[in-house]
Image (cartoon, grey):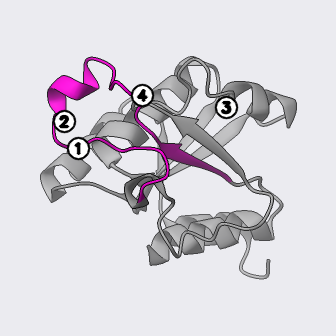
Amino acid sequence: MPAIATTVALCRGTGIPVIYTRHVDPVPRSRPLGEWWPGDHIGAGTPAAELLPGAGRAAGDLVVEKSTYSAFAAGTGLEEALRGMGVEEVIVAGVMSNLCCETTARDAFVRGFRVFFSADATATASRDLHEATLLNMAYGFAYIVDCERLEAAFGKDN
């Protein structure tokens, strides 16, 4: 969480819009997620569907609800919101590196956005999965960054 909060603060300090995503499963849960995660239903209004404390959310921040791995899935409005703001580049941070973060990053790339994928502001169930995702992203989808690289790119006096 500290790396996510730092990434958010760095972005805010340079005027980069911050958009959050929240996973909420429909009732009944859609296939194929229900097949992969039969006991992990994330219902609307439950603690599991809330943004993690310490993520740096501010009043007025856009929160996109999704019911699958990609935040760009049909009906989320994310792409339209980004295009409406004139955004051409995205920084992906959050959980889980190999599922939601990777799928969102790939979809952003396919839609023509330049993608930056955070090595330290993403996480997943194991180090092996996280490192595999970083390798996948770096091989044709995203530039790998971390808080230190973002701070250097944005300047320390934000």
| Residue at 55% from the left image edge and 66% from the top image edge | 149
Any mark on residue 78, and which? 3
Q: Secondary structure at mark 2?
A: loop
The residue segment tinted magenta is 19-46
**Amino acid type, callout 4:** Gly
Q: Quadrant of the N terminus?
A: bottom left
Q: Residues within 10 Å of mark 3 (few under 14, many from 20)?
A: many
Q: Looking at the picture, tell me which residue is in the foreground, 62 or 109.
A: 62
Which residue lies under the disc numbered 1? 40
Which residue lies under the disc numbered 2? 37
Observer-side mark, 4 or 3, equals: 3
**Amino acid type, callout 3:** Leu
Which is more N-terminal, label 1 or label 4? 1
Observer-side mark, 2 or 3, equals: 2
Within the magenta stretch, is there residue 13? no
Which is more N-terminal, label 3 or label 1? 1
Which residue lies under the disc numbered 4? 140
- 3D distance between C-alphas at marks 4 and 3: 22 Å
Which is more N-terminal, label 3 or label 2? 2
Observer-side mark, 4 or 2, equals: 2
**Amino acid type, callout 2:** Trp
Q: Secondary structure at mark 3?
A: helix
Q: Percent from the top left, x then y, of residue 49?
A: 44, 52
Which is more N-terminal, label 2 or label 4? 2
Which is more N-terminal, label 3 or label 4? 3
Q: Looking at the picture, tell me which residue is in the foreground, 74 or 90.
A: 74
- 3D distance between C-alphas at marks 4 and 2: 29 Å
